[in-house]
Structures are given as structure tokens and as C-alpha cells.
Amino acid sequence: MNHMRVATWLVAAFLVAACGSSGGGGGGTNSYSGKTIKLGAVLSITGAGGVYGPQSRDGAMLAVKQINASGGVNGAKIELTVEDDASDKAQSAQKAQTLIQSNQVMAVLGPTLSNSAVAVHPLAESLKTPILAVSTTGIHIVPDCKFPETAACKFVFRDSLGEQTAIPDNIKAYSDDAHPKTGVLLVAQDDKFSSDGGKIVQQTVATHNIQLLQTIPFSKNDADLAPYVTQAVRLKPDVIFITSLGGIPAKIMSAARNQGWQGQFLGGNGFNTATVSKQAGAAGKGARSASAWYIGNDFASNKDFVDAYKKEYGKDPDQFAAQGFTGVQILADAAKRANLTFSDLAGDREKLRGAMESVNIQTPLGPFQFTSDHDVKQTVWIIQMDGQGGFTLVKKIDAS
Amino acid sequence: MDQQILNAIFIGSIYALFAVGYTLVFGILDILNLAHSAVFMLGAALTYSLVVNHGQPFWIAALLGIAASALMGLVIEHVCLRPLRRRHAPPIAALISTIGLALVIVAAVEQGKSGSLFSWLWVDGANSVAFPAGTVPNPTWHIGDLTLEASKVLIIPISIALMLILGYVMRFTQVGRGLRAVAENPRAARLMGLDVDRMISLTLVISSALGGLAGILFGLALGDISPYIGRDNVEVRGLAVIVLGGMGSIPGAVIGGYLLGLIEILALVTFGSNARGGVAFAALFLMLVLRPQGLFGTRLRERI
């Protein structure tokens, strides 16, 4: 009798468990337990992009750790392989190719720099592998990754805020506040991100009645920036626009302040990391840029992220960390809904790509969805350097 | 005086100091040592590592950096030049072997990351770094419209003093006479009892020490130290400088260095900043067409 009861309970328990799993399957969430979702990231850990890439990596790694600790993606563990492209376009493409073809990753994050994206994104597109840009902000990243070809790239997405939105927002915000009359643009002409930013500045200033006195192009490899800064400062502009990356904006700020110039620095995404703010120090105080993220946002998905990041790495996250973290969240959410087979890689990549288009999740950047162009649509935060390696919020601009 | 002229003199001093080492080797060996720009970078990188990663005071680090650069001169001689000389290889072979060594040095530094084989030398990979503020006192003076930074002003007397000392050594000392004898005719010098190999080693040591020092001053004044500073900033310009001044001429390299600094700034002010990069090539080309021996060079002659 007793045995019968135990047996009945066992059968009942088994049936419930079976129903549970088949019910889940019916709802679109297959069990992936025991499987591994292989992801890759090509980031600039060293070189000019080395002031951004490490934070992207740390943010992404934190997301992987959190997701795996809370049971993975329908039971599957995420395995993220990060490769350093040394901020070099050719290395970037080569690392991406290795990840896609040898490591057989399901999707790739990156690359850090727009200059490398022009090589890496078309490659991922041709290899039919989803690639999610987490920091590239240049023109023609999505959807027309093969520019000047205009056909939309199906496999290329980005969660970073394009300079075509960010720079005009930043200039508008400052000219509403201070009505500057004149500006000079310092632009690193041999880098896609920087030269794209320069073009956007040139196109935007006139609508705010700012006269661009001179555009001073230079090379990103030039160590001696003093002559360019001297040229800019002697025109006594109200604003110096800097579109460049790595340590260059900080060096320009220091040199300009050293030469006694007191005006306003306006820049782009290149400013948006604590590393640059720290390098600029007091010279950077007040320098403004438009950011995709602000540390002080206290909605839960950001607050939890900031707390976890601080606990993990012992320092504040920055925009690049938030975008890297969001990148993994997006891929994990898409993978959860994609009914992956784990036997047909090409098919799984296509399914993942499809699921990415309908992502709708809470992230440190706010509620996240892709536009039909695979781009991000989000609130923009105008921030300024605080002179001590951090940033303060100037104003918030809602997505139009 | 104008801030831009000051800018030109600062950078010109670095070009001159770099090119003096370049031209010294050419004057004596008739060989272009293309590893010179790698030594320039190595001096800066090692000094930076000693200060930041090994906690040494700047002055000690700089002396060690210069010593290591000098030692690198011996490596260039023993690895790239002497074996080829023994086999009577043409100068082009030596030129190519120095390019090879330069690539090796740059790649070794580039691979330097914490935990790697070269982490004692460099941990910043492809990154560009700068000496932390306060490594050397760097007051800034404002005189009228001019801004003078101590770290840049310092370069000028150091460069000029070193170049004067070198000029004195070459002209008035026993060693200088020996070096000039080797430059004139190595075989005759050997017959006169000079140890030619030793003289050549000495040349490379002096040249590389100057190159390393130029790198250290560059890193200090411009706040940019990376595996690529030699390649990107002084390699081709150094070549332009010694062509301008006259291949093998020390006073020529000095004047050529300042001249290139001035020409670059003049081009930037007159034609816009785009012109700066190309002007070194233009100067090199024009000089080769109009006066192939350079400003101070003796007329080129084929040796029989």
C-alpha cells in the first residue's frame, strides 16, 4: 500500500515535470539545458580605442556572468570570447573572421571603432552571422553597412547612439544655453568615426547661427598637436569642436587651456568615457557631449547594473560598459526566443537574427527596441566633464 | 615672436637630435640605419616603464633608457651589420636587415602586456600613454601671447649642448679622428692600425644613445609614448632632415631638423593643416632634384 502511494506520487511528479517542459516548449522557449551559446566580441582593448574597448568588454562580461549565474538562456550557458583588434582595421577583420569561421560563434559584438566596422560588418553580413555594434557611432553603420551600396544589411545591428543624432543634439543644447557665435573644428581626418563627426558638425553649425571660422584637420597619428591648437586658439572662437578619439581630445583640451583659451569644448562620443575625462583633468571641466547613457539614472535596470559593475570591478561604469552589457542582454533575449537547434549553425544564426529584430527589454540604456533600420532609438543625455574624471548631467533630450 | 615659431623650434629640436644619430651612422658607414626610429621608441618606452611600472625616479629611468638604447646600438651592429660586412654584402642588404630589426623591436613592444614575455619592458600593448603629471616639474610661463612649457623649453638647450659636444668630439679628439678616418676609407684606416670594428660599434652606440634620448624628450614634451611613435613621427621626417642637411653631415642634420620644423609650420599656417604631413616629402623631393648633396653635404662621388 505504502509502496503503491510512493509510486503514484512518483508517476504524478514525472507527469507534472513532463507537462511543464512540453508546455514551455509550446510557448516558444525550448529547453537548451546542457548547451553552450558561443558568442564572440572584437574590441579595441589596446591602441587608440583602448580608452573605450576595455569597458565594453567588462560590461559584456558582467552580463554573461549574471545570465549564467541565474540559470543561463533557457538553461544554456553563454560563452563569450573577446579578441583585441589593437584598434587596427585589418586585425579587426581578421579576428572577426576567426571567431565566425574557426570558433563558430553564433553572433559577434563589436568592433569598437567605426573605422574597423567598415571592414568587419560587411564581412559578418557576407558570412550570414549576426553582428551587434556596441560602440560604433559613425555614419553608414546601419542599415547600409556596405556603403556606398545602399542595400540594407540584414545581419548588422547596433545598440550605440549614432553621431548623426548625438552631435546635433549636443550643439543645439549648448547654443540654446549660450548662443555662441563662432567655432573652430579640430578633426582627425584619417579615422572614420572622427571624420564623420567632423562632417556632422559642419552640417549642423549653420542651423544654430554658429560661424565655423576654420576646420583644422590633422592625422590621428600626429603626436605634436600644439601647432593645430595654436591655429585654433588664435582665431578666438567661442567654441572648439573636437571630433577625434583616444587620448587626443584630452591633449587638445590641455594644450588649449595652456595657451590661455577660455571657451567651450563640444565633442562627440569620443568624450564619453571616464578615461578621457580623467586624462583631460581640470582642462576638460565643462566639456560637453551627448551620451547614450548617464550613470545617475535611477530606473531599476540601470541602478542594478551600476551597483553590480561597481561590485565586480571596483569602479564606476561608463557609457561603453553600459552598451556592452546591453549588447549581451540583447543577444541573450533573442537567443531565448529563437528556438535554437544547436545542430545547424547557419540556421541558428538566421533564427537569432530574426529574433533580434523583435527585442523589447529593459536595459541600463532604458527600454530597448531596434528601429526597422536595426538602429537604436533612445533618450539622449547631454553630459559635461566635471574636471575630476567624471561627468555631470546637463540635460535630457527625449527621442524624437 | 609667434607661438607657431616656438612650436617649430620645439619639434625641430627633436627632429635634429634624432637626425644627428641617423646621419652619424650614414656618414661613417654609408648605411641607412632604419632601426634608428625603433631605438627612438624603445628609449621612450623603457623610460616610461621604469618610471610608471617599476617606480624609478625619472632621472634614473632616463639614464637607464639611454643606456639601453646605446646597448641596442651594439645589437644593431652585431646582428644587422657586422655579419653582412664580413660577407661583403651590398649596403642595401644592411638597410633591409635594419628594417627587419625595427619591425622586431616594434612588434616586441606591441606584444608587451601584463603577464606576457615582455611585460618587464612594456605593459600597454598598442596603447598610447604619457608620463604622469609631475614626473618632472613642468611649470608653464606666459610671456605676452607666448606660452612656454618647461618640458619643451628644456629640449632646446639639451639638444644644442649635445650636438655641440658631438661636433667637438668628432673634430678635435682622438676618437673623432679615428671615426673620420673610418668614414674616409675603412681599409686605409685598418692599415694605419685602427680597430675599425670597434670604431663602428662606437658610432652605433653614440648614434643610438642620441636616438633614445630624442625619444625620451619626445615622450616627455608631447605626452605620447606608444610602439608607433618612431614610425609615425620621425622615421620619414628624419630621412627628409638628413637629405635636406646633406647625408652624413652633422651640422647639416641640426640645421635640417630646425628647417623641417619651420617648413612644416609654415606650410600649416599658409596652406592649412593638411599640408603639414606632405611637406617633408616635398622638401625631400625638391632637395634631391635641385641639390642632391643637401645644404652641407659634399658633392656625391662614386667611390672607385
Image (spheres, coloured by chain):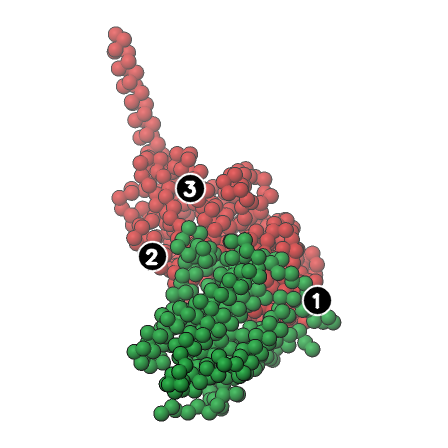
Q: Which mark is residue B141?
A: 1
Local crowd size for mark 3, using a 10 Å CA cut-off: few (<14), some (14–19), many (≥20) = many
Q: Provide residue A219's location: percent of width, then percent of height.
A: 52, 69
Asked if A191 appears above or below A301 in the picture, the reply is below
Residue B26 in view: yes
Q: Amino acid at mark 3?
A: Val
Q: Amino acid at mark 1?
A: Trp
Mark 3 vs mark 1: give the one in front: 1
Tell me the SS state at disc 2.
helix
Label the green chain with its letter.
Answer: B
Q: Amino acid at mark 2?
A: Gln
Left/right of residue A372 with respect to residue B165 in the rendered view: left
Q: Provide residue B224's location: percent of width, then percent of height.
A: 54, 63
Which residue position holds label 3?
A64
Q: Provide residue A39's location: percent of width, then percent of height.
A: 37, 47
Rendered residue at 37%/75% (across/down):
B81
Left/right of residue A218 with respect to residue A109 in the rendered view: right
Mark 2 vs mark 1: give the one in front: 1
Separation of residues labelled 3 and 2 (CA atoms): 22 Å
